[in-house]
Amino acid sequence: MTAAPAASVVDAFRAAASHAGDRAMVVTAQASTSGRELVELVDAKVDALSRLGVGEGARVGVVAWPPEAFVSDLFALFALGALALPLSAETTAWELARVDLQAGLTHLLAPGSSELSLGPSTTTIGRQLGSCAQHTASAVPAGAAILQLTSGTTGRHGLAVRPASALLSEAAHYRQGLSLTSDDRIFSSLPLHHAYGLGLCCLAAPLVPAAVEYASHVARRPRMLLRALADSHATIFPTVPAMLRVVARAGGEATLPSLRAVITAGAPLDRHTGQEGRKLGQAVGQVYGTTETGPICIQPPDADRMSWQAVGPPLDDVEVRLAASAYQGGAPAPVHVRSPSMLLGYWEDGGLDDTCIAAGAFATGDLGYFDGSELVLTGRISNALKVAGETISPEEIEAALLGCPDVDAALVSGLPDDRLGQRIHARVAPKTVSLEVLRRLCEQRLAPSKVPHVFDAVASLPRTASGKIIRTATARAT
């Protein structure tokens, strides 16, 4: 794969924004920013950031808020040949210090109201503050454009280095897989630093160009989110399965006629959640991908084609290999991916470590198998339980639990056991769920060896900003 220069992403952005002209590309509750205005913001920031010392090899942390600032920051940094590292809008000083230890940030861009800084000296750049650190820029792989934090569900972060060519490919995958056009309006409450929100809303949409309405102010308030979604007249609603479930329930029998696509990512879509999502008036599609690879499969919403077991066939230019290793006899195997949108490697000790790429492919850490052309995921290698010598996928049990309409969230982990090796522990939310009903459900749907030994109902389960349950934090709490 030949890495395209970062300037190619900026050229594509300028062409799309010029096409948009005075049409809105970024919409928030406070402001609307047109294509022309976004180009002006990027140009102003290129000038201001270059005076701040940002150039090739600089590693710049970018707080992902407000949206018009974040989107323009990204393209300005691409234009300057710097590496952008998107950060959560809720990043604390302690979290920034931890990221800085890994990345060796040379600069930081944060909202004007933020107290985050890399040093005592700050510079105002529009509505933002820019600060510098003592770290120096260093040589980076040709075409490298972005650093992305990974492994948010395990508590251990990596820094994936991805080139501009990967970003262009990711945008093309979303554009083609979802049939995005300039007539689309995306309604997003996704965190923008997260791979899903970043790839779809901050890269693919501006390059179409499609308008994005950012609604993080209602992200955790389902009824308000539903009202805002209805008022937006959006055509596409990207979300995660857990939020879709809650929003669909909050809507009752209400439908949203303007929607043509409801898309989930972050976890496989189970049948019950997909059926709940159809209450909004559309079938539900899903995206399977990773931070390191971008989208791998995009299953568009189509009630006639929807397969609840599978995440769909791989995208046309994405190759999925199933590594046999210890998984034999038709059992699920580790999923390896070769894609034009994947990473170059991880940023380690001030340089690139590409040992994660073997024979041109990246090991996703997922287990799966093919049903015809459709990829079926069965769980994560790192999550697998060993019960009386049998390998058990906790995700399969969680899918069975989520089949109960009263369950909002479920997480299955292992408890140490001298006789079995591990016992299966199921935690479900909310606390009012009948555990006896769940036990009977599992006995009906699962083989006896997979029925949880212990059931607990809790008020809620801890989640990442994107809605995924934090598996290790929950396991430690057991």
Image: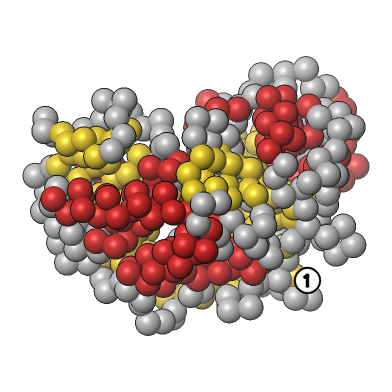
Q: Is residue 475 above or below residue 179?
A: above
List x then y, in percent, for residue 430.
Answer: 72, 22
| Residue found at x 17% / y 54% | 50
Report helix, strand or loop for mark 1.
strand
* Circle 1 crowding by C-alpha within 10 Å: few under 14, some 14–19, many from 20: few
| Residue found at x 25% / y 55% | 46
Query: Is 242 displayed left or right of 56 in the figure?
Result: right
- Location of the N terminus by quadrant is bottom left
Name the residue tied to disc 1.
Answer: 371
Query: Image quarter for residue 314?
Result: bottom right
- Location of the C terminus by quadrant is top right
154 or 328: nearer the eye?
A: 154
Q: Is residue 38 above or below residue 367?
A: above
| Residue found at x 35% / y 39% | 63
List x then y, in percent, for residue 382.
Answer: 53, 52
Q: How many marks?
A: 1
| One can see residue 107 in this view | yes
The kind of residue tagged 1 is Asp
List x then y, in percent, for residue 310.
Answer: 75, 61
Q: Is residue 39 above or below residue 217?
A: below
Q: How is the image coloured?
A: secondary structure
List x then y, in percent, for residue 129.
Answer: 24, 35
| Residue found at x 83% / y 22% | 434
Query: Is 118 displayed left or right of 442 in the figure?
Result: left
| One can see residue 335 in this view | no
Outermost residue on the front side: it is 22
Query: Is 350 displayed left or right of 263 in the figure?
Result: left
Q: Is residue 202 above or below residue 454?
A: below
Query: Is 433 displayed left or right of 454 in the figure?
Result: right
